[in-house]
Amino acid sequence: MLRVAIVGASGYTGGELARLLCSHPSVTVTAATSRQYDGQSLAQIFPHLRDQTDIVCKNLSTAEIIDLADFIFCAVPHKTAMDVVPDFLDAGKKVVDLSADFRLKDVAVYEKWYQPHSAAALVKTAVYGLPELYREQISSAQLVANPGCYPTSITLALAPLLKTTLIDTSSIIADSKSGTSGAGRAASVGTLFCEVTDGFRPYKVGGVHRHVPEIEQNLSELAGTPIQVSFTPHLLPISRGILSTVYVNCNETVSPEHLYSLYQTMYQGQRFVRLLDPGIQPATQYVRGSNYCDIGLALDERTNRIIITSTIDNIVKGASGQAVQNMNLMCGFPEETGLEQVPLFP
Amino acid sequence: MLRVAIVGASGYTGGELARLLCSHPSVTVTAATSRQYDGQSLAQIFPHLRDQTDIVCKNLSTAEIIDLADFIFCAVPHKTAMDVVPDFLDAGKKVVDLSADFRLKDVAVYEKWYQPHSAAALVKTAVYGLPELYREQISSAQLVANPGCYPTSITLALAPLLKTTLIDTSSIIADSKSGTSGAGRAASVGTLFCEVTDGFRPYKVGGVHRHVPEIEQNLSELAGTPIQVSFTPHLLPISRGILSTVYVNCNETVSPEHLYSLYQTMYQGQRFVRLLDPGIQPATQYVRGSNYCDIGLALDERTNRIIITSTIDNIVKGASGQAVQNMNLMCGFPEETGLEQVPLFP
Amino acid sequence: MLRVAIVGASGYTGGELARLLCSHPSVTVTAATSRQYDGQSLAQIFPHLRDQTDIVCKNLSTAEIIDLADFIFCAVPHKTAMDVVPDFLDAGKKVVDLSADFRLKDVAVYEKWYQPHSAAALVKTAVYGLPELYREQISSAQLVANPGCYPTSITLALAPLLKTTLIDTSSIIADSKSGTSGAGRAASVGTLFCEVTDGFRPYKVGGVHRHVPEIEQNLSELAGTPIQVSFTPHLLPISRGILSTVYVNCNETVSPEHLYSLYQTMYQGQRFVRLLDPGIQPATQYVRGSNYCDIGLALDERTNRIIITSTIDNIVKGASGQAVQNMNLMCGFPEETGLEQVPLFP
Amino acid sequence: MLRVAIVGASGYTGGELARLLCSHPSVTVTAATSRQYDGQSLAQIFPHLRDQTDIVCKNLSTAEIIDLADFIFCAVPHKTAMDVVPDFLDAGKKVVDLSADFRLKDVAVYEKWYQPHSAAALVKTAVYGLPELYREQISSAQLVANPGCYPTSITLALAPLLKTTLIDTSSIIADSKSGTSGAGRAASVGTLFCEVTDGFRPYKVGGVHRHVPEIEQNLSELAGTPIQVSFTPHLLPISRGILSTVYVNCNETVSPEHLYSLYQTMYQGQRFVRLLDPGIQPATQYVRGSNYCDIGLALDERTNRIIITSTIDNIVKGASGQAVQNMNLMCGFPEETGLEQVPLFP
């Protein structure tokens, strides 16, 4: 049994890692850290986990974590992550970091959107953990930077097209909608029930959300040319789920069959991508609680645009599920181990 | 007191007309029709209206309606509307029709998206009831075609820009999200609570929603040139509210100040449009139950796009509230009469 | 125009007072206080109030409030209220206090459930502000203690029965369910959207909620004999609304007609109580946004129990609406002024 | 692999059986029936099941079902069930019937609350499928009547007390609240999203819900004496979950420790009952998607009442999960097989 630590276990992604790892036959959670809930069991912090785990959250030092675990999920906020990851790596541990700290290859870009980077040298060695695109590199990585939720949904939506010359890469618009769990479990007025329920709003409009550089890095790498996008996030009155509606102009006339075949070619055999039949659209509720990314395709023949819609559970495929998927690859477990939850509907 | 009929009183727009007219000092509802609920009081069909109205819904003939009322709100589905509106007009009644039957000026376009038109001659005489744009014409109209909910939100979002040459009119993308009341009160599996709650989905993707020709008619008329748009509707797990996120490419560099001034110029003095300060975004919950349209502006300087976000309550400004606003204009009442409800939050 | 102050304007009850007073023709809000949001306009704190009010929240001293207003709504938490109310009264102002500080007639009981009382002498002079029961006393009061939300729903549900000898007063059980706005607008993990939505829970089970003594005081006074009740509150995933299901054992056989007549006798002519026809049950959504209390009656003939169900909007009839109703009585305005909002459904 | 049929696969309980059986290593679904969706794959009817099952729903005859399967889940409505179950039994199949048709031991009672029974002789042979109470009998049964959702939550809440003389069995009041999935997937106005969301209501108040006789049968059998209860169901704006708040008067003074020990004794070793520590209350969201029943205990010392709160996922432990649990017992599989889903929160 692989001894696993969850660093930052009291947030929603930490709790979700615990939920998923309960079903994983080859690992055991030997450490779970929390400053705020030091001394409380994970089942007190997350009562749905009663009888599923005995682990008690503690305010552990990095040395203690290193002593207790061989594989480390780092689920603390950016900035905090870069402070602890180097020690874990030095101790020979494998790490999946769920923060933004090791996602951006260009440290200058990181520092423009976040703050100074204290572990810049490690950025080069980190592998971007989107298994559908980088499975090989992940398998041999010591440090995997787990993708952001919005970038996961948008990158998987566009990847097949970016390998072609079909589309005008200056025309990409991603209109994304996220459930509220993406905002985390910290107390705040803006995410109170009464502020969110029965409502809907955009935020960080105009290309100012921190996921913009991550999205553009992914798309540019796939296309082999610099790409800028317009990205608008919105807050949905649901707990889990992201749905991105992505618009691109075509350089030429595309048939629905050809469009579909591009996606089928890329995603056949991918366990966690479900390409929907033409005419079918995804819905967040059909991936709830699962590691699936569902993708729908449409052509607007009148305006010669392609509209791709993709949906994930933001704390599974958009965070903790993808992290477990990366761990599986890094450790030689079958990729789907612990991730076979059927979506929960209704 | 103006004697008013609500034809089709048992749907959500019919119920909302009744709610709004309860607060209107110059009208009295003298007829409310329903086939399905013939003989039931409106307060039985809509228990929130208990003690507010004594009206009983009946399956009235057009002759009976004509006898009972001097002003008629037609809140039945398209096709049914065109069957009864001519009789009302012949009898000298003023009519606001909430269906799509008299919105599209080009009957051929109507017939392509809907079905054959049996009252084509009347289309020319109908005035499109968006008071912020067509107040004068509405004031002297006998028949007003009340706008669709999506077109209202998108047209008000774009009108100030279409009067300029700032934007590339071939670049317009409207990504809209609507509450479930827009689907009506008929029993259907797709709008059951369990199918909709805690979920989100696009529908009619690829320019196939029937509001497309109405949106394009409005924008083309404002710009003075044919415009095609990409329009994608989505279903929100909320009762009331539409929020449209509209993207346009700029032909030149625009300053935030100039952008704001365009909107300020057009909407100052408009009682029901609230232009938000730069940096502020709208939210459906802040217009809930009111006749407001809230509009937010943003520039994505990196991609040189303008993003306009607009929100309305789909059954107030998007349907019944706008219908009352039109009635006020048609009858010489102050435009805001009966429409001064403060939004309900939380 | 009566000059009115809202002390504690940034919470949900403060915001709701502002919403209601916008529609009140005889008052003007001349002061709104907030420590946390000092200097922000009420429309910034509550964006639904844009264009409705120009008032700016300030951290005002009691002297400043006294200078600015003639009538004061005190919407601050208990303990804070008792610190400021005496000064307002000394200055000759009329006050409706929405906290618990002046509701309990027995100071010893107050101090057992809350904390030491610093203005005990005033308790005797305060009138309990449930207009349906104490209209006369309220009309001549200088200080009105606005009832709690749960006590309002339960007291109105039971009052007609307590004037009779029909029921076993030792058998009363009140199972109440409240929307989340009752928990206020302060940031807290327990009322985050993701913690509350798609869920339901009891809290403070076993007679330990602070509304227990208030409920028992009301019922005891009505019956003229000491009464103890079992009261269980629950948290609903809705913003607004309380529904109480109240069970009592009958001392004798009661007919449905007699039961109904008791309620009809007591509540006829009461503008804000809607007694539902036999067989009809209330629902929170039918009173949303209004000052109504809807009451339904049922007999369980097999067990000889009466089940009364009553519902209110917890921040209207359960707080701010009732406060305005009290103000109207205290100031000689018609009781329903500013409170004629039709419930908002759906 | 056991060949299993789901008769009535297109409702929510049918879909949930399919979800759970996807994770069951010892069974394979070889037949799924639906009249309405004849010829559609289960993954079309329930898109969350894409890639999980290839089964196509067909309008199969009983003979065809008998030919295709060795174990049959009957998930059709009452009345329909009694028409097909006898044939399945005659053919030697084992059956779990999820309808009410075989739950009530007294056919006269059944016929009073439902309609004439056409398979009355089978009622005696059916075993009531509440494994925590009747594990032995279930293990050797050919026909198991799967309990109703409300009765499951209430019976498990009261069972430990009914084995004692601590409580007054004439005092039992069960105030229950259910998610909307309990109303099924048939189109109806009353369960539309807009009718249910942001609202709450009681229904069938006064002891008239059809689960009353089932609840009373269970409690009477446990106590060994006839018991009548007051039971009030309410509709929650959530998809999944029932929470019952149960009140009983004590015959004598009970200590919290003694109360807790009664439950601990009865439920220790029960895999799917989680007895909460004193002071902790359950919540529907902590059992969502799982087969758990969570039970909380409280004493109201002032009124000498015990308040038991119990929660289940109504379509797992309240229907399909319990059905799989029964199948496991009937077929000699470990009881928890296919039922180890961790609750999904948030």
Image (tube, coloured by chain):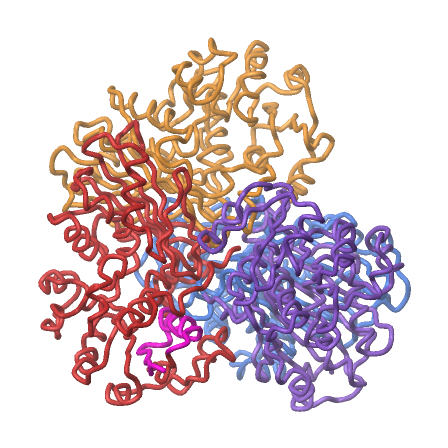
Chain colours: A orange, B red, C purple, D blue
- From where the camera sits, is residue D130 visible? yes
**Location of residue B86 in the rendering, given as x and y in whole percent from the top left corner:** 17, 79
**Location of residue D142 in the rendering, given as x and y in whole percent from the top left corner:** 57, 64
User: Which corner quadrant of the image does residue C170 belong to?
Assistant: bottom right
- In the image, B190 versus A1, the foreground residue is B190
- In the image, A130 versus C171, the foreground residue is C171
Question: Against C242, is A285 above or below?
Answer: above
- In the image, D237 versus D4, the foreground residue is D237
* Residue appearing at x 40%, y 29% in the figure: A211
Q: In screen coordinates, is B238 left or right of D153?
A: left
Question: Against D116, is C99 above or below?
Answer: above
Q: In screen coordinates, is B60 left or right of A166?
A: right
Q: In screen coordinates, is C297 left or right of D171?
A: left
**Location of residue C341 in the rendering, given as x and y in whole percent from the top left corner:** 51, 69
User: Which corner quadrant of the image does residue A43 belong to?
Assistant: top right
> Range of the magenta residues?
B1-26
* Residue appearing at x 62%, y 43% in the figure: C187
Q: Number of marks in the image? A: 0
User: Which corner quadrant of the image does residue C21 belong to?
Assistant: bottom right
Q: In screen coordinates, is D35 left or right of D129?
A: left
**Location of residue D130 in the rendering, given as x and y in whole percent from the top left corner:** 65, 61
The C terminus of chain D appears in which quarter of the rendering?
top right
Question: Against C134, is D327 above or below?
Answer: above
- In the image, C74 versus B17, the foreground residue is C74
Residue A236 part of the magenta segment: no
Residue B25 part of the magenta segment: yes
- From where the camera sits, is residue C158 visible? no
